[in-house]
Image: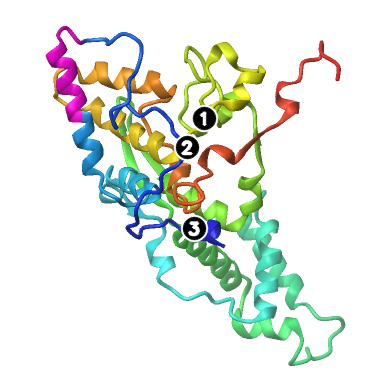
């Protein structure tokens, strides 16, 4: 199933979707321009935006969004968490040992984890009476690999660090007036991709209230012309019959324009900020692409970035309104 694939990095032609106005592609927009004083400045910013949109090439939207987030180069300013542990193989290599690790993980969440781990080893290796432990028993297997409670607790801690390392966690230092503070983090696109692969139904049927939805999709929630995240219905017809005929949001055009708007934030072209504002007003979006579009199936065919969220009625129900 294509939706469960990781980021689609293969270059492919961009399929055309439902028509959504695109300023970078030459669409018209209404509204004032913040810093434009002449027609030449407006045209210069428009040409710059169109040129940048063309420079993005024909790669898939998911590949463009992934490249955008990776260009911040956080990797160069950080180091892997527990790299030494991650390079070592897991000591829990048999079903009996993995079962022991399964029980050790929840037992060390509270209190003293090392002491709790050592207590678990004593429990697993204990045998009734003074008789000899059967060689095939779980107690004998655990004792053969971990000669002491300290060795067992060290192995559990090593496996925990190894899992964190393999999950892609990194650490860096944030400089602040109060001093240097350590920060652990994961790559945003990788976190979302891994989460989707582990639980695809959660995202395909994800529910959120209106602010959560708009924030995740990098769309404006107030002071805009298009309040719906699925279609381009105007504010004055939202909730009425004409809204049913509104064009759907085009993932290709919308996310491309978000990338252009972000580039305009740092452009030195005259009236670039005005062009950025026009573009964001046109699509009722923010100047930042949604990280969800980095996932194949959301930022590549069938392009369901704007359709993955449902409405959780418990989030918006008022006590004063009864069904």
Q: Pointer 1 and pointer 2: residues touching (CB < 8 Å)? A: yes
Residue 295 picture location, percent across and down: 47, 50
Question: Would residue 194 be found to the left or right of residue 47 on screen?
Answer: right
Q: Earlier in the sequence, mark 3 or mark 2?
A: 2
Q: Is residue 299 above or below residue 115?
A: above
Q: Which residue is mark 1?
A: 247
Can you say which quadrant of the picture contains the N terminus?
bottom right
Q: Nearer the viewer, residue 272 or 49?
A: 49
Q: Is residue 199 above or below residue 150?
A: above
**In terms of secondary structure, where does tag 2 sit?**
loop
Q: Nearer the viewer, residue 95 or 302?
A: 302
Query: Spatial distance from mark 3 to mark 2, Cα to Cα?
Result: 42 Å
Q: Residue at x 68, y 85 (%)?
A: 141
**Callout 1 crowding tier (Cα within 10 Å): few <14, some 14–19, many ≥20:** some
Q: Pointer 1 and pointer 3: residues touching (CB < 8 Å)? A: no
Residue 279 picture location, percent across and down: 33, 23
**Residue 298 is inside the magenta segment:** no
Residue 26 picture location, percent across and down: 28, 28
- Note whether residue 185 is visible: no
Q: Earlier in the sequence, mark 1 or mark 3?
A: 3
Q: Nearer the viewer, mark 1 or mark 3?
A: 1
Question: Would residue 55 be found to the left or right of residue 290 on screen?
Answer: left
**In terms of secondary structure, where does tag 3 sit?**
helix
Q: Which mark is residue 164?
A: 3
Q: Quadrant of residue 180?
A: top left
**Callout 3 crowding tier (Cα within 10 Å): few <14, some 14–19, many ≥20:** some
Specify start and end residues of the magenta stretch as a single range: 36-48
Q: Which residue is mark 2?
A: 18
Q: Nearer the viewer, residue 115 or 82?
A: 82
Query: Spatial distance from mark 1 to mark 3, Cα to Cα?
Result: 44 Å
């Amino acid at each position: 199933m294509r939706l469960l694939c990781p980021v689609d990095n293969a270059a492919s032609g961009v399929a055309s979707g439902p028509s959504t106005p695109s300023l970078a592609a030459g669409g018209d927009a209404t509204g004032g321009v913040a810093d434009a004083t002449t027609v030449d400045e407006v045209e210069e910013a428009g040409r710059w935006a169109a040129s940048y949109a063309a420079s993005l090439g024909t790669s898939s939207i998911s590949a463009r969004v992934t490249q955008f987030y990776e260009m911040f180069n956080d990797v160069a300013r950080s180091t892997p968490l527990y790299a030494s542990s991650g390079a070592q193989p897991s000591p829990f290599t048999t079903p009996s040992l993995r079962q022991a690790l399964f029980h050790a993980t929840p037992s060390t969440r509270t209190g003293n984890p090392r002491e709790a781990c050592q207590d678990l080893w004593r429990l697993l290796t204990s045998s009734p009476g003074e008789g000899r432990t059967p060689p095939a028993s779980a107690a004998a297997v655990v004792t053969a690999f971990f000669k002491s409670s300290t060795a067992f607790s060290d192995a559990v801690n090593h496996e925990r660090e190894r899992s964190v390392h393999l999950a892609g966690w990194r650490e860096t230092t944030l400089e602040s007036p109060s001093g240097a503070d350590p920060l652990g983090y994961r790559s945003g696109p990788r976190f979302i991709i891994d989460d989707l692969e582990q639980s695809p139904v959660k995202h395909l049927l994800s529910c959120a209230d209106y602010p959560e939805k708009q924030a995740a999709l990098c769309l404006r929630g107030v002071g805009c012309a298009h309040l719906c995240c699925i279609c381009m219905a105007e504010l004055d017809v939202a909730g009425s019959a004409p809204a049913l005929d509104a064009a759907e949001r085009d993932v290709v055009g919308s996310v491309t324009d978000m990338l252009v708007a972000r580039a305009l934030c740092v452009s030195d072209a005259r009236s670039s900020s005005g062009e950025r504002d026009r573009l964001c007003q046109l699509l009722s979006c923010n100047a930042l692409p949604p990280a969800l579009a980095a996932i194949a199936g959301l930022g590549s065919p069938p392009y369901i970035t704007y359709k993955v969220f449902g409405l959780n009625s418990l989030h918006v129900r008022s006590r004063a309104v009864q069904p």
